[in-house]
Image (cartoon, rainbow, N blue to C red):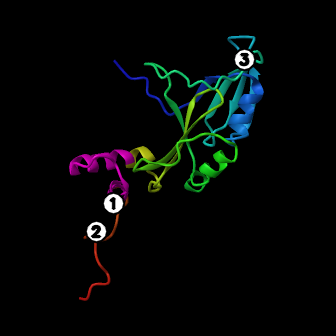
Amino acid sequence: MRKLQTQGVHHITLVGADRQTSIDFWEGLLGMPFVFEQPNLDKASESHLYFDPGDGRLITVFTNEERKPDPTRTPTDIGCVHHLALAVSQATFWQAVERLDERGIRHSGPKDRGFMDSIYFEDPLGLLIELASYRFEPPWGVSHGQVMIEAHRLRVARGDHHIDRIHLADAIENLTARINDSLSADRSPKNPYAKR
């Protein structure tokens, strides 16, 4: 038996209301370029809109001009999507409250997640959206996931409740030492200001 190995998210497709609501939200609020549109090839009464969330992947929306936005919270039953998290820079994250407030959009305010910052609000159709911003940049050639698993291992070994900045910093140090060779025989921490 063998796995069907994935290599990333290809796209996420949501059921939308009318076309303009989708464009106004995904591009007009979240800045995702509207890059492609065609009929829904499985349902002729719908259009299929494609948006680029910023990483070259796609978020697509099925729209129908007969559907109207319903801001009632989408179901969170077993098997349903709880929320969609979108990556933003720290610079954008710390502008989110002001930019949501100027539109009158209710939100959670900033949430400290230890390894990232989050803010939550609902789209015009009741889907919970999270703006998430990592508090770290991985070393060159290392993914965010690799830093996270190393930070997790450190957190568990130390008996800490959740990943926080110290685990991230130590994880980045460990990964850098593992993936980068050095001519130094002793790579342990030093104090170059100590009197010798």
Q: Residues within 10 Å of mark 1 (few under 14, many from 20)?
A: few
Which of pointers 1 and 3 lies earlier in the amino acid sequence? 3
Name the one closer to the observer, 131 or 108. Answer: 108
Label 3 SS: loop
Q: Is residue 157 magenta?
A: yes
| On screen, residue 110 above or below 129 | below
Q: Closest to the observer: 98 or 194?
A: 98
To which residue does mark 1 refer?
177
Dot 3 crowding, Cα within 10 Å, few <14, some 14–19, many 20+? few
Image position, residue 78 (x, y; %): 43, 19
Determine the secondary structure under disc 1: helix
Q: Earlier in the sequence, mark 1 or mark 2?
A: 1
**Magenta segment range?**
148-177
The residues bearing labels 1 and 3 have C-alpha atoms spaced at a distance of: 55 Å
Give the residue pinned by disc 3: 67
Which label is found at residue 113? Answer: none
Q: Which of the two discs, 2 and 3, sits closer to the camera?
A: 3
Q: CA distance from mark 2 to mark 3?
A: 63 Å
Residue at disc 2, secondary structure: loop
Disc 1 to disc 2: CB gap under 8 Å: yes
Q: Going from the N terminus, do you reach mark 2 or mark 3 first?
A: 3
Q: Residues within 10 Å of mark 2 (few under 14, many from 20)?
A: few
Residue 162 on the magenta span: yes
- Res 103 quadrant in image: top right
Please name the residue that numbered disc 2 is placed on.
Answer: 187
Q: Is residue 161 left or right of residue 66?
A: left
Single out the residue that lies furthest toward the bottom.
195
